[in-house]
Image (cartoon, helix red, strand yellow):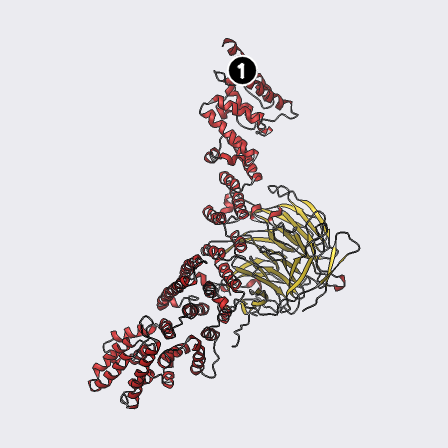
C-alpha cells in the first residue's frame, strides 16, 4: 500500500521576514525561543530587535480532560508492565484482553467528557479547545479500540468479528441515541422529521430491538398498514445474531442466517413493502443492497461504518483474514472517485490488513501526540505481536515510542511524575533519559525538591541527589537561610560547602552571641563528621549546652579537648579560652591540675604566635563579666593574669583538701 | 507547533544570543547594544525582565549560564576582546519589590587580543571551569579554584588552534571511560587550511586534533552521551552535519590520544547556504539548526537512526516593523494548520566513512585525522 508521508510542518513566526534576517533560537524545556538576528559579520545596519517568540508544541497535555486520560492510562500501563513474563501465555491472554478493555473504557470516559464539554456552546467556541490537532488524536483515541480488538482480542471464531466491529461503530456514532431521545420526547414522534433517520440508523448499526421500538410508533399511526409493519417487525426480530457464548456452531448459525435472508428476499420479491418507501429501504438494507446503503451515506457518515453494515448484512461470518478485501472495496465504493483518502483512512485500512507496523508508522506521522502509538505498541509488544509480525526490532520500537511519549509528559509541571514510570520500563535508555530530565525539574519549593530527591533515591541516582541538594544548599545560602543551607549540604555530603556554612554559623555567633537553628545543630549526630569545621560547630554547641545544664566538668573537658585535639580552628582559640574563664572562676574546682596545665599550654601556644588574634565576640556570652576593664590589645595578658589568679586559688584548694 | 507568546525584548540593537538557565525558568539575552538582560518566568508563564545592564564596550556575542550548583552565574563574551563572569546577589528589599535583581561583575578575562567569539562552561563534574575562544585562534580554559570566590580565575590551558575560532562545545558526558573533550570550530573560509573542527581531549598530556571538516564552521554541538560508547557531534557549516565518533580500542601501552572512527550519520543542505547554529534538546532526540534561509529547522531520528526534517520555523513574511511593533498585538496565537509529524524519517542508511590517520610532523601530541569519504 502507499506510504503515508507528510512534509515537515512550517510554523509561521509573526513579524519576521526570513528573506532578510536569520532566525536565532534556543531550546527550552518544553519550547523553543526564536528571535531575529544576523549571523554574518558584515550584517549591515541592524536596528532594534523587537521580539523573542516562544514556540510551543503538544497543546494536548494542557487540556484537563486529556490530562485525566494520561493519568488513568498511566495506571493501566503500569499494571500491564506487572504482568509476569513467566506466566504461560494461555493465562496471560485474558489479562491482555482486560487491559485493552481498560484502555478502552478510559478512552470512552474521556470521549464522553469531551462531548459534554463541547456541547456547551460557550465553551466550544473557546479558541483552541478542541483544535484540529486534538481532533485527530481524538480520532485515534476512539480507534484505539478497534486496533486492540483486531490485534489483541483477535478471536479465531469468525462470527464474533462482526460483533466487535459493530461495537466499535456504535461508539463512533453515538449521536443516534441523542437523536432518538429527541424524537421520542417530541409530541408526535412518528411525524418528527428525524424519525426515519433514527429508525434507519438503528438498523444500520444492527440494533434491531431499538429500531423495532421506534417503529411501533409509526405502526400505531397507520392502522391500515398494520400487516406490513408487523411483517417487517417480524423480520427484524428474527434476524439471527451470532453469539459466541452459546453452543451454536458457526455452520448452524450460517444455515439459520441463510434461511432468514431467503425470507427477507421473498418479501422483497412479493413487493410486500412497495407501498412504503421507508419500509422497503429497510428491507433492502437487510439483504445488504449496496445501492440502498449508499443512499444513506449521510447516516453512515464514514466508509468504515459502511463496511461494518455491509458485513453485518452480507457476510456476517467474515474471517479476519478476509477483512481487508471488504475494507478496500468499501472504501472505494463509499468515497467519491475524486476524493483522495486521508492519512487516517489509510491507517484504518492498514489495520484491517493487520499490518501492525504500517499502522504504528502511519500513526506516528499523522498524530501530534505519542499517547496512542506508545500505548498501542507497548500492548502489542507484551502480547508478543510485534515479533509475530516479523518486526525484529520489536522492543526497540516500543521503547522509542514510549521514550518520546514520556519526554513529552516531562515538560508538563505535574504530569512529569507519570513519565517516571514510563522511563522505568524502558530498559535501554529509560534511565539515562530520566537522569537528564529529572535534574531539570524546577525546584520551586523544598517540598518539590524532596519529591524529586525521593524519586532519584528510589533509583539509586546518587549524582542527581547530590546535585539537587547542592543546588538547594546554594539557594538557601543566597537567601541567608543558614540552617536550611547546612542541612542540604549535609544531605549532599558536600564537605567544602558544609565547612563554609559552619564558618558562617560561627561568624554569626560571634556577631550576635547566639546560635540560630539550634534544632539542627543539636541533632547533627554522625553527620557532624562531614567536615572538621562542622564537627567543631557541633561540639562547640555541645559545650554550650553542657554549660547551660551546669555540667561544668564535662563542659570543661570538652572545651579543652576542642583545643588539644586541634578540632577548633586557631582563630577561634581565644574565644574558647575566654569561655574557659567563667569555669575557672567557679567556686568548686573544675579543671584538674593537669587540665589547667593544658589550658595554660594552649594559651602559651596562642600568645607565642606572631599575631595575637583579637577576640571576635562579646565577652558576656557565657554570662561572664570581667572584673576589670579589658582592652583588646592587652587581653591575652589579662587573661594570663586571670589564669594565674585562678590557679593559685586552685592550688590553695588542693592544699586545704 | 505554534507561537505561544511573544516577548518584547527591547534591545536597542541585534540580539546575538539567548540562553536558558538549567531549569528553564530564567533566560538571558545579549545584544550588539552591549547589554545583557535577564528574564524570569512567572508562575503563569509570563517573562519579566529582572535585570538589564551594560556588560561590555562592544557587541556581546554569547551569554551562558553556569550550572545552578555554582549559584546564579552568567558568562558573556564580546567584540571588546574580553569575557566576563557575572553573579547575581540578593539585592536590597526595595529592589525585590520592584522585581529587579543585582548582577555584579566578578571578573573580566582579558587574555585575548581579538574578539572573543564563544564562551562555554565545562560540564559540572569538572568543577567551575570556563572556556573561551577567540578570533585569533586561541582556546583558553579558566578555572575558579574556590567556587565560593568567583573573582579569582586562573588560566589553566591555552591552546593555539592556528585558525580563527568561532565556536566551542564540551562533551557533556561525565563517563570515566574517556577523558573530557572539547570540540572547536573555525569559520576560516579558506578550504586550503584544512581541518575546521578540532577535538581536544582535556588531559594533562594529550591534546589531539581528531577530525577535520574543510569548510567554515560556525557552530558545533556535542550531543548528550546517553551512556553510549560513542559520541555524537553536530556541526553547522555549509550544511548541517551529524557525526558519530566511535573510539577505537587503544593499545594498552599507548599513551597517545584516542583514535576515533568517524562516521557521518546525516548531512542536510536544506538551508540552501551557510548554517549558523546547531543545538540539541535535552535528551538529544531533536537537533535544531538555523541557516541562511532564515529558518530554524528541526531534525529527528527514528528508531532506525534515520534522520529527517520534522519541522520548520519560518517568518510569515510580514514586514519587519522594528521596535514600533505593538506587544499586545503580537500575543495572539498563531497555529500551524497541519498536524506536525512525529517523525518517521526514512532516509538512506548512514554511510560509513573510512578514515586515514597520520601524525602531524610538527607536533608530538597533535594528531590530525583527514577524512576521506567512501560511501557504501
For mark 1, does the 10 Å Cα neighbourhood hold few (<14), some (14 to 19), or many (20 or more) residues? some
Residue with the mark numbered 1: A646
- Residue at image position (52%, 25%) is A558
- Residue at image position (39%, 75%) is A158
Left or right side of B247 for A389: left
Q: Is residue B235 above or below residue B348?
A: above
Image coordinates of residue B50 in percent, x first then y, are 53, 51
Q: Quadrant of residue A231?
A: bottom left
Residue at the far right in the pictured view: B361
In terms of depth relative to the viewer, which is nearer, A105 or A653? Answer: A105
Q: Is residue A472 above or below residue B246?
A: above
Image coordinates of residue A387 in percent, x first then y, are 50, 66
Left or right side of B349 for A370: left
Image coordinates of residue B10 in percent, x first then y, are 56, 58
In terms of depth relative to the viewer, which is nearer, B223 or A584? Answer: B223
Q: Identify the secondary structure beneath mark 1.
A: helix
Q: Quadrant of residue A93?
A: bottom left
Q: Residue B49: tell me if it is visible.
A: no
In terms of depth relative to the viewer, which is nearer, A641 or B362? Answer: B362
Q: The residue marked by circle 1 belongs to what chain? A: A
Q: Quadrant of residue B246?
A: bottom right
Left or right side of B340 for B368: right
Image coordinates of residue A129 in percent, x first then y, are 42, 66
Amino acid at each position: 500500500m502507499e506510504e503515508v508521508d507528510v512534509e515537515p510542518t512550517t510554523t509561521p513566526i509573526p513579524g519576521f521576514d526570513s528573506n532578510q534576517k536569520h532566525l536565532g533560537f534556543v531550546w527550552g524545556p518544553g519550547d523553543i525561543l526564536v528571535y531575529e538576528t544576523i549571523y554574518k559579520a558584515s550584517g549591515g545596519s541592524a536596528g532594534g530587535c523587537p521580539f523573542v517568540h516562544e514556540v510551543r508544541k503538544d497543546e494536548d497535555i494542557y487540556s484537563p480532560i486529556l490530562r485525566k486520560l494520561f493519568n488513568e492510562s498511566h495506571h493501566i500501563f503500569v499494571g500491564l508492565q506487572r504482568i509476569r513474563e513467566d506466566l504461560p501465555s494461555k493465562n496471560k491472554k485474558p489479562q491482555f484482553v482486560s487491559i485493552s478493555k481498560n484502555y478502552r473504557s478510559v478512552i470512552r470516559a474521556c470521549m464522553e467528557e469531551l462531548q459534554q464539554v463541547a456541547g456547551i456552546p460557550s465553551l466550544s467556541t473557546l479558541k483552541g479547545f478542541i483544535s484540529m490537532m486534538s481532533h485527530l488524536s481524538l480520532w485515534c483515541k476512539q480507534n484505539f479500540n478497534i486496533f486492540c480488538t483486531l490485534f489483541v482480542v483477535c478471536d479465531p471464531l469468525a462470527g464474533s468479528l462482526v460483533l466487535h466491529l459493530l461495537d466499535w461503530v456504535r461508539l463512533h456514532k453515538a449521536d443516534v441515541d441523542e437523536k432518538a431521545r429527541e424524537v421520542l420526547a417530541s409530541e408526535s414522534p412518528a411525524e418528527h422529521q428525524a424519525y426515519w433517520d433514527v429508525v434507519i440508523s438503528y438498523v444500520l448499526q444492527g440494533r434491531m430491538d431499538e429500531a423495532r421500538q421506534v417503529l411501533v410508533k409509526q405502526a400505531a399511526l397507520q392502522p391500515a398498514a398494520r400487516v406490513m409493519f408487523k411483517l417487517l417487525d417480524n423480520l427484524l426480530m428474527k434476524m439471527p445474531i451470532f453469539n459466541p457464548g452459546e453452543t451454536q456452531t458457526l455452520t448452524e448459525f450460517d444455515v439459520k442466517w441463510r434461511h432468514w435472508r431467503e425470507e427477507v428476499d421473498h418479501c422483497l420479491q412479493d413487493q410486500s413493502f412497495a407501498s412504503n418507501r421507508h419500509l422497503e429501504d429497510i428491507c433492502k438494507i437487510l439483504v445488504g443492497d449496496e445501492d440502498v446503503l449508499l443512499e444513506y451515506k449521510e447516516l453512515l457518515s464514514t466508509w468504515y461504518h459502511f463496511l461494518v453494515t455491509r458485513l453485518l448484512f452480507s457476510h456476517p461470518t467474515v474471517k479476519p483474514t478476509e477483512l481487508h478485501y471488504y475494507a478496500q472495496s468499501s472504501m472505494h465504493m463509499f468515497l467519491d472517485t475524486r476524493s483522495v483518502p486521508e492519512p487516517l483512512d489509510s491507517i484504518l485500512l492498514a489495520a484491517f490488513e493487520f499490518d501492525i507496523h504500517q499502522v504504528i508508522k502511519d500513526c506516528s506521522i499523522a498524530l501530534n501526540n505519542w499517547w496512542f502509538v506508545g500505548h498501542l505498541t507497548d500492548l502489542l509488544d507484551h502480547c508478543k505481536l510485534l515479533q509475530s509480525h516479523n518486526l525484529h526490532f520489536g522492543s526497540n520500537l516500543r521503547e522509542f515510542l514510549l521514550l518520546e511519549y514520556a519526554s513529552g509528559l516531562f515538560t508538563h509541571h505535574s504530569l512529569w511524575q507519570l513519565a517516571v514510570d514510563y522511563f522505568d520500563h524502558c530498559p535501554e535508555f529509560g534511565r539515562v533519559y530520566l537522569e537528564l530530565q529529572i535534574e531539570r525539574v524546577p525546584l520551586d519549593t523544598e517540598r518539590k525538591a524532596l519529591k524529586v530527591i525521593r524519586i532519584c533515591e528510589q533509583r539509586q541516582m546518587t549524582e542527581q541527589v547530590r546535585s539537587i541538594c547542592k543546588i538547594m544548599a546554594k539557594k538557601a545560602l543566597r537567601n541567608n537561610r543558614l540552617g536550611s543551607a547546612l542541612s542540604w549540604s549535609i544531605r549532599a555530603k558536600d564537605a567544602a560547602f558544609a565547612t563554609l556554612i559552619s564558618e558562617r554559623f560561627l561568624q554569626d555567633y560571634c556577631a550576635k552571641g547566639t546560635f540560630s537553628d539550634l534544632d539542627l545543630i543539636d541533632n547533627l549526630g554522625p553527620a557532624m563528621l562531614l567536615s572538621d569545621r562542622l564537627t567543631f560547630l557541633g561540639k562547640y554547641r555541645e559545650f554550650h549546652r553542657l554549660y547551660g545544664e551546669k555540667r561544668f566538668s564535662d563542659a570543661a573537658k570538652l572545651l579543652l579537648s576542642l583545643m588539644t585535639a586541634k578540632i577548633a580552628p586557631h582563630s577561634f582559640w581565644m574565644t574558647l579560652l575566654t569561655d574557659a574563664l567563667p569555669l575557672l572562676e567557679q567556686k568548686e574546682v573544675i579543671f584538674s591540675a593537669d587540665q589547667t596545665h593544658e589550658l595554660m599550654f594552649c594559651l602559651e601556644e596562642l600568645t607565642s604566635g606572631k599575631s595575637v588574634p583579637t577576640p571576635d565576640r562579646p565577652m558576656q556570652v557565657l554570662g561572664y563579666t570581667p572584673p576589670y576593664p579589658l582592652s583588646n590589645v592587652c587581653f591575652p595578658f589579662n587573661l594570663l593574669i586571670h589564669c594565674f589568679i585562678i590557679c593559685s586559688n586552685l592550688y590553695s584548694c588542693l592544699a586545704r583538701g | 507547533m505554534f507561537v505561544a507568546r511573544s516577548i518584547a525584548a527591547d534591545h536597542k540593537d541585534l540580539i546575538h544570543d539567548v540562553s536558558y538557565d538549567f531549569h528553564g525558568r530564567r533566560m538571558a539575552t545579549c545584544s550588539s547594544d552591549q547589554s545583557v538582560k535577564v528574564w524570569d518566568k512567572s508562575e503563569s508563564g509570563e517573562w519579566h525582565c529582572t535585570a538589564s545592564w551594560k556588560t561590555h564596550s562592544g557587541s556581546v556575542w554569547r551569554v551562558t549560564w553556569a550550572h545552578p550548583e555554582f549559584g546564579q552565574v552568567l558568562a558573556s563574551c564580546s567584540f571588546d576582546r574580553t569575557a566576563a563572569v557575572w553573579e547575581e546577589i540578593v539585592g536590597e528589599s526595595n529592589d525585590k519589590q520592584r522585581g529587579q535583581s543585582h548582577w555584579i561583575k566578578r571578573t573580566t578575562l582579558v587574555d585575548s587580543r581579538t574578539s572573543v567569539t564563544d564562551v562555554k562552561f565545562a560540564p559540572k563534574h569538572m568543577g567551575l571551569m570556563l572556556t573561551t575562544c577567540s578570533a585569533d585562534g586561541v582556546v583558553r580554559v579558566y578555572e575558579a579554584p574556590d567556587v565560593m570566590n568567583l573573582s579569582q580565575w586562573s588560566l589553566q590551558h591555552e591552546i593555539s588552534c592556528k585558525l580563527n575560532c568561532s565556536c566551542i562545545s564540551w562533551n557533556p558526558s561525565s563517563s570515566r571511560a574517556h577523558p573530557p573533550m572539547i570540540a572547536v570550530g573555525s569559520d576560516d573560509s579558506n578550504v586550503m587550511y584544512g581541518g575546521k573542527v578540532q577535538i581536544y581531549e582535556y588531559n594533562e598530556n594529550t591534546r589531539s586534533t581528531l577530525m577535520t571538516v574543510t569548510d567554515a564552521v560556525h557552530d558545533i554541538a556535542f550531543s548528550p552521551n546517553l551512556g553510549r560508547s560513542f559520541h555524537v557531534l553536530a556541526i553547522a557549516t555549509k550544511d548541517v552535519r551529524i557525526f558519530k565518533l566511535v573510539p577505537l580500542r587503544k593499545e594498552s601501552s599507548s599513551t597517545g590520544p584516542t583514535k576515533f572512527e568517524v562516521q557521518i550519520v546525516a548531512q542536510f543542505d536544506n538551508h540552501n547556504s551557510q548554517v549558523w547554529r546547531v543545538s540539541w534538546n535535552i535528551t538529544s532526540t531533536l537537533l535544531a539548526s538555523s541557516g541562511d534561509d532564515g529558518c530554524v529547522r528541526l531534525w529527528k531520528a527514528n528508531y532506525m537512526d534515520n534522520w529527517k526534517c520534522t519541522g520548520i520555523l519560518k517568518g510569515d513574511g510580514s514586514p519587519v516593523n522594528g521596535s514600533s511593533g505593538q506587544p499586545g498585538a503580537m500575543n495572539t496565537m498563531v497555529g500551524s494548520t497541519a498536524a506536525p509529524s512525529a517523525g518517521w524519517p526514512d532516509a538512506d542508511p548512514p554511510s560509513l566513512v573510512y578514515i586515514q590517520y597520520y601524525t602531524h610532523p610538527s607536533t608530538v601530541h597533535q594528531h590530525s585525522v583527514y577524512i576521506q569519504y567512501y560511501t557504501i
